[in-house]
Image (cartoon, rainbow, N blue to C red):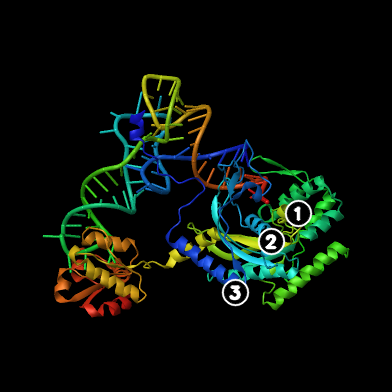
Amino acid sequence: MSKNKKNFRPKARRVKGFEDRSGAVLRSEQQLLGAAASVFDAHGFEPLATPSFEYADALGKFLPDEERPNEGVFALEDDDRQWMALRYDHTAPLARFVAQNYDGLAKPFRRYAMGSVWRNEKPGPGRFREFIQIDADTVGSKNPAADAEMILLAAEVMRAIPAISSNFTININDRRLLDVLLTDIGIAQNEAGDLQKGIVVRAIDKLDRLGERGVELLLGEGRKDESGDFTKGAGLSPADIETVLRFTRTGCDQRTDTLSALQGLLGTSESASSALNELKLIDNLLEKSGINSQQARFEPSIVRGLGYYTGPVFEADITLQTTDDKGRPVRFGSVGGGGRYDGLVARFKGVEVPATGFSFGISRLAAMLAGFASKDEHHNGPVVVLALEPEHMDSYFAMASELRANGIRAEVYMGTSGMKAQMKYADKRNAPAVVIVGEDERKAGTVTVKNLALGSKMSAEITDNARWRAERPAQTTDKRDQLLSMVKAVF
RNA sequence: GCCGCCUUAGCUCAGUUGGUUAGAGCGCCGGUUUGUGGAACCGGAGGUCCUUGGUUCGAGACCAAGAGGCGGUACCA
């Protein structure tokens, strides 16, 4: 036994569904977080950070039970036998925070949050068990202007990201329109009806993936997928299916056209007009804020899968086209969304507190931006000061400091290997240049700067390595006080 | 959760009807060049052929179970 223990080596492996991030991805993340935070700040939203853990009962209806304590969330039992769980979004912690501090908050309470959220689910491509979400919400207002502000924020965050700029569309809908429609075709206002409603909403949510034909099956008897798995449908009649599908087709290029089309379809009942009037208000506020129909459109086919929305919902789509490593076109699609959820805080307070918000995932966006960056930024590492004579480290440190003081990313080689290895190191780090001061330079009071980017370009024509090395191209030697200007010349 | 496909070197993969010592390209390390990365040439390290069990004189290959990965689908507060 002890022998086994002695020889035990843990296998170095990453937990499934989690990822290591570094370099370009991490920098993109920081850039995105910074861009979003400054948009929120500019609009007067306050930052708020809540703990990663919440008591499980605060997170929602899926409470840990004896058999499946980790269903959906990562949960563990505290000393006092209370279940706590990692947050799966920023909205539930917000509801808890508002309920707990309700009397002291200026209402409407507007805050933003950013950070990791965790979901204990099967990971997939682009779907991880830990990812970063950015979230902004307004709690305590049922004014549709608050919804319009959320859409405006979403648009401005997109615009603030240079790689996206205007290549996005925000699709807006209102859950109440669908409610009106479903009530019209006779879906009951009870538990069974809610269940059926849920199936309809999830079916519509799949329009982009399954197409109208697939959604038609899901609205009717059900659908069998390619793997032979059968999904039970909503059981609507063919006529009702057609009505629902017609509703999803009412999206027009101009927001006002869509509103007219919806009016025609839903009629002028009180519930229909009140929802449509709010959308009109939102349209007007977006217009005045400079958000045109191309960047934010009314699109009845987007519904959001989640059950808790009670009013306007929206989804932000990146329309940018890129290609993957195999040259196939990739669409990024939905990166986030939100809407009105008037019931969430009620779980704690007992009274309904209206709220609206939106959130989007940073991780996929960051991966995309990093992909752009790695395509054209090669020699973007630090300038490397070679450490050729260990007893003269002080002068190497002084040179690196001087470069940094002038805004140039610079480091001293910290290893103990020879010059050749140091050059390889600099190459691998994508250093634009190396600074060389060995015995020769030191005695002559000079410094040599080698332009690695230029050298690498010239190396394409290498035929004779001996001559190449003798000529030592792409490097210059000058007096020590010329260091800064020589390095600057590289950029 | 359900269905399908896959698993051989760090990576991408080849490996004949089951047959001796399991290969390639790239990468890595070293040398040609003791102060110069990238080209070229030479050399080297690196393998639990996913695991366990079975069939067989003999298994990387065939069979079964399990694990992991990928894809689809469902769920997603």
Name the residue that disc number 2 marks.
A102
User: Mark 3 or mark 2: which is in front?
Assistant: 2
Determine if residue A274 is in view.
yes
Q: Earlier in the sequence, mark 2 or mark 1?
A: 2
Q: Chain of mark 3?
A: A
The residue positioned 33% from the left and 34% from the top of the image is: A6
Q: Residues within 10 Å of mark 1 (few under 14, many from 20)?
A: few
Identity of the amino acid at label 3? Ala
Badge 3 element:
helix
Residue A42, numbered label? 3
- Chain bearing mark 2: A
Q: Is residue A350 left or right of residue B32?
A: right
Q: Earlier in the sequence, mark 3 or mark 2?
A: 3
Q: Amino acid at mark 1?
A: Gly
* Quadrant of the rendered image containing residue A404: bottom left
The quadrant of the rendering that contains the N terminus of chain A is top left
Specify the quadrant that holds the C terminus of chain A: bottom left
Q: CA distance from mark 3 to mark 2?
A: 24 Å
- Please name the residue that numbered disc 1 is placed on: A350
| Dot 2 alpha-carbon crowd within 10 angstroms: few under 14, some 14 to 19, many 20 or more | some
Considering depth in this image, is B24 or A405 the residue closer to the camera? Answer: A405
Q: Left or right: A178 with respect to A435?
A: right
